[in-house]
Image (cartoon, rainbow, N blue to C red):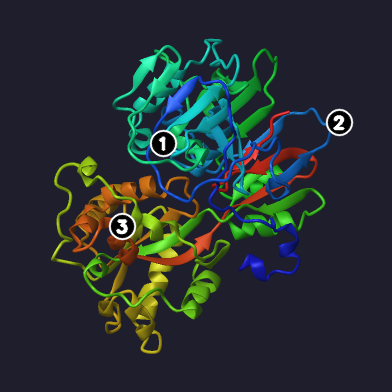
Amino acid sequence: DKLLMRPGFRRWAVPARARNPFGVRASVAAALTIVSSGCGPAPPAGPAPESPAEACVVGTRSVDDDGQISIGLTGRVDPADAPVPQTESERFVFRLLYETLVSVDCDGRLRPGLAEAWRSDTQNRVWTFTLRDAAEFWDGVRVSALDVISSWRARPGARALVRVDSVTVLGDRLRVALTSPTPSAAMFAHPALAVARRGPGAVWPAGTTPIRVELGPAASSGVVRIQPAGATRPLVEFARASVADERDFLDRGVDVLVTDRPRTLDYAATRASEFNVVPLPWNQTYVVLAPRRIHDQPTGRLPDRLLHDLARDAVRVNARAAEAPFWWLDASRCGFDTSTLGGGGAAEPSTNVSRRIVYGTRDDTAREIAERLVALAGSPGDRRDLESIDFAWSAPAGAISATGLDATRFSASLRAGAELGYVIPLPRVVLNACAETLAILGRAPWLLSAPHDAGTALTRALVPLVDVRLHAVLRRERVSATADWDGTLRVVVP
């Protein structure tokens, strides 16, 4: 069921894939001054584009159509997580409701978000943002720079991106202690830096977009409705119906569905007069994290033939062999302050290493990859291909197994480095490679026990396998939408 092999599939292809975004829009007025951490190449100067790149436009709405848009959700949406998503469905919903200072499209172009303009000093050590004029929360309270920092302080994910522990507040001007240059304002588009204010007893934290959640009986039934301020009816309804088959969503009249299931996409393709199927940017890279490699001298990545076979035959979603460049290759230049990980986390990997390749029980793609690697390890003809991961993988048949662990057990095992290998997804594109690397070191602190720096240890331990992506199924002439830097579909609310 490989979609890329089906006749006519490529006619929906988006011509540009996401890449690292860099660009700056200058400002004269100063409303918010921020100094943060980061790494990467210096950005070109220039204005933020007023409209997304053509490659990022994935749907159009008829100018005569003013009806409500219905969007199908396949996963949970928990207001307690807002504004930082934990599932793909939450990423979809929260992107409409909560703003970061800037936004970045799939072609790497910066656009205004909560901030209407920004600039940096000559050394890229101080960034100055001007908040949008008369920006308000849903309840009409004006957004101040203090609200921005208060929102960030409440989240560990935000504190990993921006140093907010020594903020000086002077009216609407805030200064964050310098750590290292931040070459692009793009990092401020990270979902962890979205701005929200949670009031006492509020189900949903208040956002700053012109649309808001409509509360009422539907909110407790799995349906999320959003509408502009002052509107009398919702314009977008997110329906999380209990369907055994995603194709039922399309039969029930849903206008938008984001999915990676081949059966659903094949079904939508048979109804081409009604639906347009658009592949979104490649958004995840599945890797094997192999603890033994931090001390060994690995020979490199797996052979291209094996990677192509994994993408074509092992997984059921739209996949390709993982393609460089990989953001973690720059991690050795970050200069980590590993004391932020706390708790003396630099312990050696477990000496009692299992003979298992493990994966999260809820991740079907990780399971399929792990099972195929085990099959290869047991095949005399393919066994040698795995030597570039670890010589121990070229073991006799039956010596290695694939095992699923629930989230709690997987996290504990990864922290101990107790398995032969871990199959995990990593974001394909990141806005701050150093912060993402630090997050991995927090999950796998044994990387800090290597005889070289943490960035080099991570580069050795990670073996890229396949890239995957989602697809958007859009009812024709009913939905205007664009794709963001991380492959998230952003529906344009009329």
Three-letter amino acid code at disc 3? Gly
| Residue designated by label 2 | 64
Q: Nearer the viewer, mark 2 or mark 1?
A: 1
Task: Name the quadrant of the N terminus.
Answer: bottom right
Tell me residue 231's x, y (percent): 69, 15
Ranked by sequence position, the earlier of labels 3 and 2 is 2
Ranked by sequence position, the earlier of labels 2 and 1 is 2
Ranked by sequence position, the earlier of labels 3 and 1 is 1
Q: From this view, report whether residue 354 is shown above or below residue 43.
A: below
| Residue designated by label 1 | 125
Task: Name the quadrant of the C terminus.
Answer: top right
In this rendering, position of residue 37 left or right of residue 222: left
- Disc 2/disc 1 C-alpha distance (Å): 48 Å
Tell me residue 413's x, y (percent): 23, 55
C-beta proximity under 8 Å, tags 3 and 2:
no
| Residue designated by label 3 | 455
Residue 367 position by quadrant: bottom left
Q: Residue furthest front?
A: 122
Q: Nearer the viewer, mark 3 or mark 1?
A: 1
Residue at figure coordinates x 26%, y 56% from the top left? 454
Residue at figure coordinates x 79%, y 27% from the top left? 66
Q: Give the SS element for disc 3.
A: helix
C-beta proximity under 8 Å, tags 3 and 1:
no
Q: Give the SS element for disc 1.
A: loop
Disc 3 crowd, CA 10 A, few/some/many (<14, 14-19, 20+): many
Q: From this view, report whether residue 460 is shown above or below residue 109.
A: below
In this rendering, position of residue 347 left or right of residue 45: left
- Disc 3/disc 1 C-alpha distance (Å): 23 Å
